[in-house]
């Protein structure tokens, strides 16, 4: 797996001040994607244990409320193992901080393919960005078809529960 960049103080991708990592590689290529430089699986930097350690170090501040994993595509089969590893280590070290993930894949499809990832994620913004449905007033998502899902409540109820934070 590869990544494009790490932001140590991100206030636009989830609530509060967050550490964000933008993974490399996406096959959706949504029209007017805000991050087309992350499409190639070959660009960017190699994701290693040092990358995880750097993210944990950056997150080890009271002012940091969580980790945001974006892309590219964190839930792509080429990236899912790294996403799981990072989210798991983050939650082990910071159980009270939140992990948010943005994905063009739908929650239900990822649940069938890789359910383990949801043991470590608090919120998933799912669905591909659709330029014709773009709405700049939406919170945490770019187009109205996307959902901001509360994973814990969804797992508990057995049906998708939207996050109202």
Image (cartoon, rainbow, N blue to C red):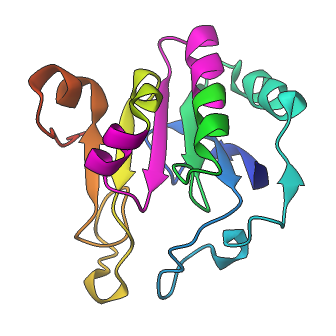
Q: What residue do we see at 44% from left, 36% from top?
A: 114
Please name whichever residue, 114 or 73, is drawn nearer the observer in this view of the structure: 114
Residue 62 seen in this snapshot: no
Instruction: Please state, as top left, top right, bottom left or bottom right, where the C terminus lies in the image.
Output: top left
> Was residue 92 drawn as part of the magenta stretch in this picture?
yes
Query: Is 83 drawn above or below residue 57 in the view shown?
Result: below
> Was residue 11 drawn as part of the magenta stretch in this picture?
no
Query: Is 139 drawn above or below residue 85 in the view shown?
Result: below
In this picture, residue 105 sits left or right of residue 90 = left
Query: Is 37 drawn above or below residue 80 in the view shown?
Result: below
Q: Where is residue 30 in the image (x, y as percent from the top left)?
A: 47, 81
Q: Position of residue 6 (x, y in %)?
A: 75, 48
Q: What residue do we see at 29% from left, 89% from top?
A: 132
Residue 88 seen in this snapshot: yes
Q: Position of residue 20 (x, y in %)?
A: 64, 44
- Picture mark count: 0
Q: Position of residue 3 (x, y in %)?
A: 76, 53
Q: What residue do we see at 58% from left, 20% from top?
A: 88
Q: What residue do we see at 67% from left, 64% from top?
A: 25
Magenta region: 86-113
In this picture, residue 29 sits left or right of residue 48 = left
In terms of image quadrants, where is residue 123? top left
In terms of image quadrants, where is residue 27? bottom right
């Amino acid at each position: 797996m590869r990544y494009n960049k790490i932001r140590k103080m991100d206030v636009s991708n989830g609530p509060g001040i967050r550490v964000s990592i933008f993974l490399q590689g996406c096959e959706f290529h949504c029209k007017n994607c805000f991050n087309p430089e992350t499409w190639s699986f070959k660009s960017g930097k190699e994701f290693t244990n040092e990358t995880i350690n750097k993210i944990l170090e950056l997150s080890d501040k009271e002012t940091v409320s969580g980790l945001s994993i974006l892309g590219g595509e964190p839930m792509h089969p080429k990236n899912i193992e790294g996403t799981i590893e990072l989210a798991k280590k983050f939650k082990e070290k910071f159980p009270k901080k939140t992990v948010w993930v943005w994905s063009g894949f739908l929650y239900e499809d990822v649940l069938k393919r890789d359910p383990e990832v949801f043991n470590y994620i608090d919120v998933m913004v799912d669905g591909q960005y659709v330029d014709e449905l773009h709405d700049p007033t939406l919170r945490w998502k770019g187009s109205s078809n996307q959902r901001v899902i509360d994973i814990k409540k969804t797992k508990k109820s057995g049906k998708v529960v939207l996050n109202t934070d």
